[in-house]
């Protein structure tokens, strides 16, 4: 069993829909990252959080440390949000362990 | 905008050849990471450096891979000899760590390069 599990693996939705991507982990962590990888391959780190909730534009990330679960939400989704979203847990100060990613496709 | 620069962007070579990938971290960042991404395994941490010293290279096959930071502006990842199973995209990332706490933006604690797409024939 992977230490970091994401669901769903693939998600297709219509423009404007509210999107939720889930991440569960089984190891002790100091923080959790959400990353975005676009079709061209570039990776952008969206959030790092260790408790509660963070918001950045239309993106919201939440984490429940007791349940070892995090969610990434996208409000008013847009085709440009189409990408692979990767959850990664931080062990210690800098070591990241990655989930397999969720491929999101937003259709116009 | 400051960015992490990786070279080359693409590399195709025959098995057995030496491959060197280079990374220029963002000026002022004191941690550098090497990651490998494959379809089967996804993203994996290979090694990382703090203030140019290797902190963890447990994810790296030691017999053929080596990672170094000859100076603060250059990190290298070498494979010798290369094998077809090394084909992957290799990412470098940099960040700023102070007293074991990550600084910089909460939205982008690590800045990734565009990757080197490596194909070993």
Image: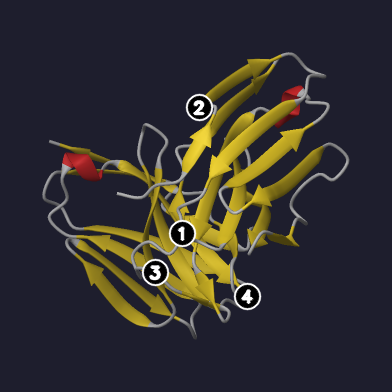
Give the label, 4 or 3, closer to the camera. 3
Q: What mark, if any, has residue A92 been given in the picture?
A: 4
Q: What mark, if any, has residue B9 been given in the picture?
A: 2
Q: Secondary structure at mark 2?
A: loop
Say if labels 3 and 1 share a chain: yes
Q: Could you tell me which chain the residue with mark 4 belongs to?
A: A
Which part of the image, by quadrant, shows the C terminus of chain A? top left
Distance in Å between CA atoms under marks 3 and 1: 9 Å
The percent position of residue B86, horizontal first and vertical second, equals 71, 30
Marks 3 and 1 in Cβ contact (< 8 Å) = no
The structure residue drawn at horizontal position 45% and vertical position 46%, both measured from the top left corner, is B4
- A61 on left or right of A49: left
Between B78 and B82, the one nearer to me in the picture: B78
Q: What mark, if any, has residue B24 been given in the picture?
A: none
Marks 2 and 4 in Cβ contact (< 8 Å) = no
> What residue would you read off at disc 1?
B110
Distance in Å between CA atoms under marks 4 and 3: 17 Å
Distance in Å between CA atoms under marks 1 and 2: 20 Å
The structure residue drawn at horizontal position 56% and vertical position 49%, both measured from the top left corner, is B73
Q: Residues within 10 Å of mark 2 (few under 14, many from 20)?
A: some
Q: Could you tell me which chain the residue with mark 2 belongs to?
A: B
The percent position of residue A79, horizontal first and vertical second, equals 18, 39
Distance in Å between CA atoms under marks 2 and 4: 31 Å
The percent position of residue B35, horizontal first and vertical second, equals 60, 47
Distance in Å between CA atoms under marks 2 and 3: 26 Å
């Amino acid at each position: 069993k992977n230490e970091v599990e994401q669901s769903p693996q693939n998600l297709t939705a219509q423009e404007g829909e509210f999107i939720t991507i889930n991440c569960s982990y089984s190891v002790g962590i100091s923080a959790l990252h959400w990353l975005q990888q676009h079709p061209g391959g570039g990776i952008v780190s969206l959030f790092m959080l260790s408790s509660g909730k963070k918001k950045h534009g239309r993106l919201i990330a939440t984490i429940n440390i007791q349940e070892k679960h995090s969610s990434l939400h996208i409000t008013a989704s847009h085709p440009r949000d189409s990408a692979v979203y990767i959850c990664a847990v931080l062990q210690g100060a800098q070591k990241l362990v990655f989930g397999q990613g969720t491929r999101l496709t937003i259709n116009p | 905008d400051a960015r992490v620069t990786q070279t080359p962007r693409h590399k195709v070579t025959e098995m057995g050849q030496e491959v060197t990938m280079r990374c220029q971290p963002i000026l002022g960042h004191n941690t550098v990471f090497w990651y490998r991404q494959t379809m089967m395994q996804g993203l994996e941490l290979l090694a990382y450096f703090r203030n140019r010293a290797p902190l963890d290279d447990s994810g790296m096959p030691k017999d053929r891979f080596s990672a170094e930071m000859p100076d603060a502006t250059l990190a290298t990842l070498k494979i010798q000899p290369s094998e077809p199973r090394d084909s992957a995209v290799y990412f470098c990332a940099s960040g700023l760590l102070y007293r074991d706490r990550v600084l910089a933006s909460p939205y982008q604690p690590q800045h990734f390069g565009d990757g080197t797409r490596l194909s070993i024939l």
